Amino acid sequence: MDTLSVRIEPSFDSWRIEARKLLEGSVPPDAVLWTDSSSTQFDLFDSGEPPRKKQEVKISKSYLDLARTVSCHSSPERWGLMYRAAWRMVCNGEKNLLQRPTDSDTRKLLEMAKAIRRDCHKMNAFVRFRKVGEYPHTGREQFVAWFEPSHHIIEYNASFFIKRFTGMDWSILSPEKCIHWDGVKLHTSEGVSKSSAPDEDDLEELWRGYYKSIFNPARLKLKAMQAEMPKKYWKNLPEAELIDELTRHSSNRRDDMIKAESLEPRPAPRNLYLQNLHKNNQDFVVNEPGTIHDKSLDELAELAACCRACPLWEKATQTVFGTGNPEARIMLVGEQPGDEEDIQGKPFVGPAGRLLDEALADAGLDREEMYITNAVKHFKWKPGSANRKRRIHDKANRGEIEACKPWLVAEVMKVQPSVIVTLGNTAAQSLIRKDFRILSERGEVNMGNLIGFPGKIIATIHPSWLLRIRDEAEQQAEFKKFTADLKLCRE
Ligand code: URA
């Protein structure tokens, strides 16, 4: 087979134009060699015209959005991977490719997109603007920041800064590309070296003061801190200089805080309602007037956003409350949000969620009609052992499950589903019985009137357990059993 060399600018738009021509010619992915102007192979090949008759090209918006994200990845393989997936969907009849997280192309695309989201998250958290001047006529201040991303995200991620700092002029400088906002339009220019970014200014003191005031020595966990704020970024952060000093004195400050606390009368809890809720689950279960039952699901979600009933909120980005149809007949209950759910604030949007979608589709169920939530509403994680930047899922313990249970019960009471499907041991142990074992007791569970819920409970495995099965045949067989459990809901 002849190889067609396709040269593009390293941008999504450039890839998209070429990919469309190739798809119209039904050119198979193995016949294409993608090179971009940042690649060393750039000048070695001639681009050719794709031959053959025209194929109609319809690419879903969700794939284009995913491909736009993946195009920012630093791997030179991304262009070929993006094309192969598009070709499989458009020319090879695999329309549902993206709903199959077990497929190796889908998995790679999703992993790359996840790496991009994490890089953007770091940029949003660690960019620090420094004031460099002021326009004499308009009085508008100018700010500059330096950031070194791991991927090509500077322009892709600009919208976050435009929204947040619309009213000021700013530039974000980086080695590959710089972006500049003038209050109206985003401009780009070539990358620069770190020495172009200013180091010191008045704002530094402000940042340091702020950081010192929010620094809580009792919560000092250096390792976790380094995992979230990798040393690579410390040099851009004025407050990082304080870390050594503050941590050296943290035991004194902690003792001072403990002493001060025992002398002063304790302030009333900011949110009495929540405190009561978590001290006494029974109040809440028996549906007394004035308890949480007067609240709507949206109000419950708002309250849960400031829940401090267990320590998991400290390391999580946000509370991930249930979502979906408030009048659903079927409610799915998972374990706890994972890394992606923690960032997006919605349950089951990561790899396990995608596998769940595939299983629901196979079982003839529509996710949109359901209410989906978790037994525990905060992501519990520990840093990876090989790669400490990775946040690895850590199982919630009994106390954490119990602390979160009032929220789950409130959701059940509000939605009043006919069927609850518990996914995995944690959900089943929260709602059914503390020592429930899914592998020996799965299926329909007769509960009587559990927590005032008269409907049916179906206990099944968790989709992330399926993702961990290495043997493909075994995985397929377990996947079928899972969809069979889900089909019980329809009956
Ligand atoms: N696993 C869960 O149990 N819940 C989620 O929301 C995501 C992964």
Image (cartoon, helix red, strand yellow):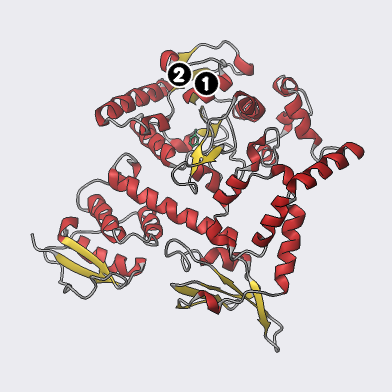
Label 2 vs 1, first from the N-terminus: 1
Instruction: Between residue 307 and residue 37, name the one nearer to us.
Output: 37
Question: In this view of the protein, can residue 192 be seen by the observer?
Answer: yes
Q: Quadrant of residue 29?
A: bottom left
Type of amino acid under label 2: Ile
Expressed as whole percent of the image width and height from the top left, the position of residue 337 reads: 53, 38
Residue at 24% across, 45% down? 94
**Total residue callouts:** 2
Name the foreground residue: 270 vs 445: 270
| Relative image position of residue 118 (x, y in whole percent) | 49, 53
Image quarter (top left, top right, bottom left or bottom right) of the C terminus? top left
Of 181 and 331, the residue lying toward us = 181
Do we see residue 291 in this rendering?
A: no
Q: Which mark is residue 438?
A: 2
Q: Are marks 2 and 1 in contact (CB under 8 Å)?
A: yes
Percent of width and height locating residue 358: 36, 36
- Give the answer, above or below, for where 140 lies relative to 203: below
Q: Secondary structure at mark 1?
A: helix
Write the residue at 59% across / 26% down.
397
| Label 1 neighbour load within 10 Å: few <14, some 14-19, many 20+ | many
- The amino acid at mark 1 is Ala
Q: Which type of secondary structure does the marked residue at label 2 adopt?
A: helix
Query: What residue is at 66 percent from the left and 74 percent from the top?
Result: 200
User: Quadrant location of the N terminus?
Assistant: bottom left
Quarter of image, res 381 = top right
Cα–Cα span, label 2 and label 1: 8 Å
Instruction: Determine whether 405 is above or below 175 in the image.
Output: above
Q: Which mark is residue 428?
A: 1
In the displayed structure, does residue 217 sit left or right of residue 108? right
Q: Is residue 292 above or below residue 22?
A: above
